[in-house]
Amino acid sequence: MVPLTESAIRASFVNCSKGEAKRLAVPRDLDAQPWTDLDFFGWHDPAAAQRAYLVAESASGLVGVALRVAPHTGHARRSMCSLCLTTHTGDGVSLMTARKAGPSGRHGNSVGAYICTDLACSLYLRGRKDAGRRIEESLTLAEKVERTRNNLLGFLANVAG
């Protein structure tokens, strides 16, 4: 992924108003991000644990979505991210919902997916972060990245719908 600027991030959001995008908390350490290892940029709002954000490159440019993170039930279980297919134990995967863009979203419609709670799918794929026991696959890294990217673009298309 190419390094992003704060202004590019704020301009990318499709499911919130310009005012909301202007007020959201963008990380201050953009220069320290491992951009070459990222397929998308995701982060949590430090002031509100239930808010998260995701920005990805698409054929039409950058697409950003504001997400709501569902609270955890506290039960230890094994869950799989619907984007990168990494399995986690406990709170490693969260249901994240995004208000749909446009009139549909203004009527309260949303789209959800189970996603790595820390939004570090790209780092799990590349072995830069460890989620514990991994399911062995015969796919190459490039194939896993492509699958994750397709899953992400499908989710973003549903949000933009």
Image: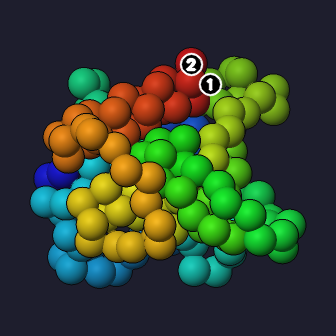
Q: Examine the image and state in which quarter residue 59 appears.
A: top left
Residue at the spot of label 1? 102
Residue 149 screen position, x and y as percent: 33, 36
Secondary structure at badge 1 equals: helix
Q: Is residue 115 above or below residue 72?
A: above
Give the amino acid type for the residue marked by disc 1 in the picture. Gly
Instruction: Using the numbered discs, state the Cα–Cα distance from disc 1 to disc 2 in whole angstroms.
Output: 8 Å
Residue 160 screen position, x and y as percent: 53, 25
Can residue 106 be seen? no
Could you classify mark 2 by the number of other residues whose Cα lies within 10 Å: few (under 14), some (14-19), or many (20 or more)?
A: few
Q: Nearer the viewer, residue 133 or 60?
A: 133
Give the amino acid type for the residue marked by disc 2 in the picture. Gly
Can residue 87 be seen? yes
Relative horizontal placement of residue 70, taking residue 133 as reference (left or right): right
Residue at the spot of label 2? 161
Tell me, what colour scheme is on the image? rainbow
Residue 57 screen position, x and y as percent: 27, 39
Q: Nearer the viewer, residue 66 or 117?
A: 117
